[in-house]
Image (cartoon, rainbow, N blue to C red):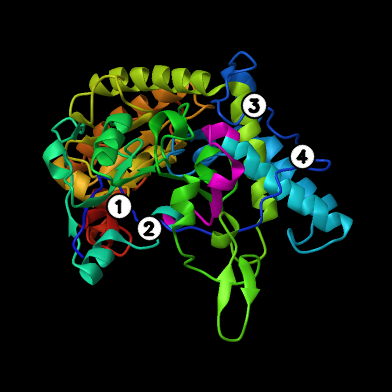
């Protein structure tokens, strides 16, 4: 059977998930359950104070290379964790550690309550109709890429069709690509390169008009903006906990219950079986059908605490704070000669991710110089080679902002980029001394980058090969 899928500029997706029997009760001796009704998006309960927020993140107090204070601008890859998340995981291990959904003793009951309590919090955070529509997976990648689109097309003869990106990185939503033969339409909630927020609801209406399923990769949107699965009318929404203050190793797949119930399991084992015979096995209904094995309760405890933390901040406040930082970053980078911003140059329908390239300096080298100054960014193609090719860029630098970043950190980024330009202009001149870095001068005369470090560091060296690959 031939089918057509319409993903976008992200990892395309076909989803099948993983884990347990829902209990949906209040956790014992842990962070209390979210009390927001399940059919609403949480609203802020306290004023937003970035300095108070920063005080909740122990890692932001440390220094890095050359004694520089850490300026962490890589939350698009993974966020940092507030103390309440670390405490929730630690408390689980110290007081409640047991196999959820298995033991009938008190610890087992408490572990189950914590695990299912986290599921209920995530459901409320997204405005899901029921906690049974929330499946815990290992990651957003597992949630969205269990059957990679290209491999599926090779096996079934399905045709992949893609919305194109415009020169500014925005999506060209061509309705002619979605036909009566289209089975799945997949789109990112926010680009992890350009920050573009596509018209998700409009694309969903287009998908449903032809009877296709609609899936959204929310890894870059759920942590940063209010998201209501009811308002967007998505059939599936995938995201990862570690990009929204939660622990590494736990992802989420939201699915309308009917859509989940129509899916077969992709992994089998304990906790998801109904009746086992030598000849055949039947499976439990969702979400347990997709969550085999002993549940990762400590990770769920941490994710539940992260949801509580973001709910208290208010996602409207989070989005407004990031929009302010993004506007400042666009202005600051635009003012530097030779810097090209990838994506829209305004904050309209744009999130807190700013990718850019520096004329004459490879992204890897810019990132290395910034690292010496204490500024952590992402360099490379960010798992988005096709998008970089469409933008005429081999690799880029990416700064991504979150709840704990400040305008002064944006200024540090701009100062560092300006210095990187001057540095490589000097070293490429073969003879000029590098300029003094912003602040103290630990980098003066320091060998940095391929041009300064000799032929063993020239691309494609083992260190730089993946950055210089087309």
Choose top left, top right, bottom left or bottom right for residue 55.
top right
Q: Tell me where the magenta segment starts and ends, as one range.
A: 124-141
Q: In terms of depth relative to the viewer, which is nearer, 371 or 262?
A: 262
Mark toward the start of the polypeptide (4 vs 3):
4
Residue on which the image places disc 1: 12
Residue at far bottom of view: 278
Which label is found at residue 185? none
Q: Residue at x 65, y 48 (%)?
A: 300
Q: Position of residue 320 (x, y in %)?
A: 45, 17
Residue holding disc 2: 145
- Asked whether the beta carbons under mark 2 and mark 3 sit within 8 Å of each other, the answer is no
- Mark 1 or mark 4, which is nearer the start of the sequence? 1
Residue 346, percent from left and from top? 26, 19
The label on residue 36 is: 3
State if disc 1 and disc 2 touch (CB < 8 Å): yes
Please indicate whether residue 138 sits to the left or right of residue 104 in the image.
Answer: left
* Quadrant of the image containing the N terminus: bottom left
Residue at mark 2 to residue at mark 4: CA–CA distance: 32 Å
Residue 26 badge = 4
Q: Nearer the viewer, mark 2 or mark 3?
A: 3
Q: Is residue 135 above or below residue 326?
A: below
Q: Choose between 433 and 101: the one closer to the eye.
A: 101
Per the model, the C-alpha gap separating discs 3 and 1 is: 32 Å
């Amino acid at each position: 059977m031939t089918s057509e899928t319409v993903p976008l500029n992200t990892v395309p997706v076909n989803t099948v998930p993983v884990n347990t029997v829902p209990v949906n009760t209040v956790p014992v001796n842990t962070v209390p359950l979210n009390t927001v009704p399940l059919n609403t998006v949480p609203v802020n309960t306290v004023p937003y104070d970035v300095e108070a927020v920063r005080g909740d993140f122990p890692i932001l107090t440390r220094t890095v290379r050359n004694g520089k204070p850490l300026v962490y601008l890589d939350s698009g890859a993974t966020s940092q964790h507030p103390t309440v998340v670390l405490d929730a995981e630690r408390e689980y291990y110290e007081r409640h550690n047991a196999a959820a959904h298995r033991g009938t003793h008190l610890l087992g009951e408490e572990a189950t309550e914590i695990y299912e309590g986290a599921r209920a919090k995530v459901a409320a955070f997204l405005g899901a109709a029921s906690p049974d529509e929330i499946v815990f997976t290992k990651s957003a990648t597992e949630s969205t890429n269990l059957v990679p689109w290209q491999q599926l097309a090779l096996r079934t003869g399905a045709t992949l069709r893609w919305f194109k990106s415009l020169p500014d990185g925005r999506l060209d939503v061509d309705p002619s690509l979605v036909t009566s033969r289209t089975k799945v339409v997949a789109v990112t909630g926010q680009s992890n390169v350009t920050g573009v927020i596509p018209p998700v609801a409009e694309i969903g209406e287009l998908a449903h008009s032809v009877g296709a399923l609609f899936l959204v990769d929310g890894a870059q949107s759920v942590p940063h903006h209010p998201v209501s699965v009811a308002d967007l009318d998505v059939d599936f929404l995938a995201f990862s906990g570690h990009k929204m203050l939660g622990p590494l190793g736990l992802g989420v797949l939201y699915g309308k219950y009917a859509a989940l119930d129509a899916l077969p399991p992709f992994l089998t084992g304990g906790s998801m079986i109904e009746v086992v015979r030598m000849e055949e096995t039947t499976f439990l209904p969702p979400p347990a059908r997709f969550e085999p094995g002993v549940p990762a309760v400590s990770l769920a405890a941490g994710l539940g605490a992260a949801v509580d933390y973001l709910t208290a901040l208010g996602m409207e406040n989070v989005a407004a704070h990031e929009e302010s930082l993004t506007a400042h970053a666009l202005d600051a980078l635009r003012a530097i000669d030779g810097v090209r911003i990838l994506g829209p140059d305004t904050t309209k329908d744009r999130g807190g991710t700013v990718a850019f390239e520096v004329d004459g300096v490879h992204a890897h080298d810019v990132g290395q110089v910034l690292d010496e100054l204490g500024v952590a960014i992402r360099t490379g193609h960010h798992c988005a080679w096709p998008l970089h090719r469409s933008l005429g860029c081999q690799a880029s630098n990416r700064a991504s902002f979150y709840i704990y970043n400040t305008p002064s950190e944006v200024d540090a980024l701009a100062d560092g980029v300006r210095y990187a330009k001057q540095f490589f202009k000097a070293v490429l001149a073969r003879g000029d001394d590098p300029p003094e870095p912003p602040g103290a001068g630990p980098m003066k005369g320091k060998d940095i980058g391929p041009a300064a470090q000799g032929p063993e560091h020239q691309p494609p060296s083992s260190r730089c090969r993946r950055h210089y690959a087309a």
